[in-house]
Image (spheres, rainbow, N blue to C red):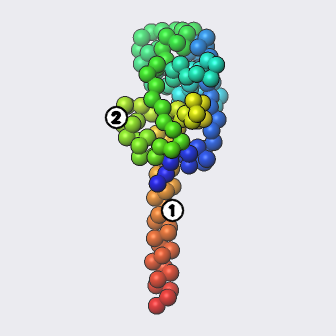
Amino acid sequence: MITVRDILKGKGSIVYSIPPSATVLDALQAMADHNIGAILVMQAGKVLGIFSERDHARRVVLQNKSESTKITEVMTEDIYFVSPQNTAEECMAQMTDKHIRHLPVVEDDKVVGVISIGDLVKAQISHQQDLIRNLENYIMGRDYNR
């Protein structure tokens, strides 16, 4: 069973964030610089919100807000968190249920990473490929022993 800890071992646990004083343009620039689809809004180690490409499209572009708008005006404040012990299946269920694509990972009251739906899909595909390879090796080994 794949856990969030396993996923973070593979992708790394760098957490990108911006302060609440940042603007939409600051957030977009940071997201582009790090090639990420969402960024946490944090102050003193506490998560205040998250800003995603979806937030930009719906809360900035469609509402004709400026790129100089404070991020706190357009960020998503209802954040769902997971722990490193959660399974990939639990995370996918939560993302599907809540219609979200990113989950901050918290351990001992500290953000230790962020996982995306893409990270989960990649981990599941890799896990399935490993299972198939192991089954093929098992079958091939049995054939060679005859």
Decide if residue 67 is on the left or right side of residue 88: right
Decide if residue 27 is on the left or right side of residue 97: right
Q: Is residue 67 visible?
A: no
Residue 58 x/y as whole percent = 42, 19
Q: Determine whether the residue tagged by mark 1 lies in a helix, strand or loop.
A: helix
Could you say which disc has been placed on residue 97 in the image?
2
Give me the residue at 63% from left, 42% from top. Answer: 12
Decide if residue 24 is on the left or right side of residue 64: right
Callout 2: few (<14), some (14-19), or many (20+) C-alpha neighbours within 10 Å?
few
Alpha-carbon distance for marks 1 and 2? 28 Å
Give me the residue at 46% from left, 70% from top. Answer: 135
Residue 33 x/y as whole percent = 65, 28
On the image, which quarter does residue 35 sit in? top right
Q: Which amino acid, mark 1?
A: Asp
Q: Which amino acid, mark 2?
A: Asp
First in sequence: mark 1 vs mark 2: 2
Q: Is residue 128 above or below residue 119?
A: below
Which residue is label 1 attached to? 130
Task: Point out the frontmost of discs 1 and 2.
Answer: 2
Residue 61 x/y as whole percent = 45, 15
On the image, which quarter does residue 101 sit in? top left
Could you say which disc has been placed on residue 3 in the image?
none
